[in-house]
Amino acid sequence: MGYTGIMPKGKKGKKGKGGKGAKGTKVTLKMAKKAIRKTPDGCHRLTLSNMGITIFPKCLLKMTNVDELDLNRNLIKILPDNIGDLESLRWLDLHSNKLESVPESLGNLVSLTHLNLSNNCLTSAGLPSALSSLSNLKSLNLGMNQLDTLPPSWAALDSLQELGLFDNLFITLPEFVSAYPNLTKLNVKRNPCSQGDGGVGQKEKKEAAKEAYLVHDSSLCRTCLKRCQREQSEEENGKCKDETCVEENGSDMSDKKKQKTISGLRTPNSVAIVSQDVWRMKQNVK
């Protein structure tokens, strides 16, 4: 992103103002204000990542002019109940902390468009129904937690375009996920629902794994989209034209069309997935 967080003052292991002690790094209001940077699109971004912070700095609640807050890769276990006071936030990154739950007041951040809570210790009981109020939320990352379901009220998050649920405990996905009208990316890799059980054959397991990552055509660059369309065309019109294939399996390619669990999304091939990171980097530079 091109933005760097502030470094803690004082020597390692020394307690005191701004240093690392039993309570971790102490962030003061003055330090935080100095760390604010302006993004290319004019937002005020505060980056405090990878600083050994164990307690959410209360001074941040006074910074109502911050649009983007990055606290990733710290040791925060609890968010303050009044975090909802930061109503100007549009982007919040808390990935790789120690969170077991998030407060109801997070639902007050109605301007939020991006929320990253991946790689924490969240359980389904720690997800508040109030997050259904985030009507502008476009990207939600809950990967690498301990979730097995989502609050039913979250069906109201119909602005969601990207949803990450990878590396969790989902046996089945909530039905409302397939009804999100604007969803373009869904990642449920490495969940029980994407791996099959012991009684499932290798072919079925492979198909389940393919469905674990789905994207909309508009999210692929032109080259990758053509690769995916070519691969799909080969599967539908080439490989299973053999009559013996139809006879042995007792079905035709109409069964394969049932692979897509969410209308409008497709499974990109491996080459396409790898190429997307490079493409997105070029798009962000423009």
Image (tube, rainbow, N blue to C red):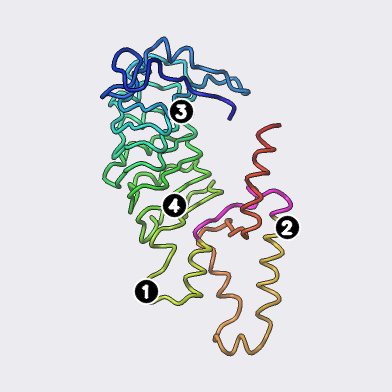
Residue sitting nearer the eye, 6 or 83: 6
Q: Residue at x 73, y 57 (%)?
A: 226
> Which residue is denoted by mark 4 in the rendering?
166
> Which residue is denoted by mark 2 in the rendering?
226
Task: Report x, y in % for residue 172.
Answer: 37, 60
- Asked whether the beta carbons under mark 1 and mark 3 sit within 8 Å of each other, the answer is no
Look at label 2 and name its amino acid. Answer: Lys
Task: Report x, y in % for residue 274.
Answer: 63, 52
Q: Earlier in the sequence, mark 3 or mark 4?
A: 3
Residues at marks 3 and 4, CA–CA distance in whole angstroms? 21 Å
- Asked whether the beta carbons under mark 3 and mark 4 sit within 8 Å of each other, the answer is no
Residue sitting nearer the eye, 146 or 178: 146
When the figure is inspected, residue 156 is found, relative to residue 49, above or below; the finding is below
Q: Earlier in the sequence, mark 4 or mark 1?
A: 4
> Which residue is denoted by mark 3 in the rendering?
70
Q: Residue at x 66, y 50 (%)?
A: 275
Q: Answer few, some or many: residues within 10 Å of disc 2's Cα (few below 14, many 20 plus, some between 14 and 19).
A: some
Q: Earlier in the sequence, mark 1 or mark 3?
A: 3
Task: Report x, y in % for residue 243.
Answer: 66, 88
Along the horizontal axis of the image, is 170 left or right of 65? left
| Secondary element at image label 1 | loop
In the picture, residue 271 is in which quadrant?
A: bottom right
> Which residue is denoted by mark 1 in the rendering?
198
Look at label 1 and name its amino acid. Answer: Gly
Q: Which of the two marks, 2 or 4, is nearer to us in this view?
A: 4
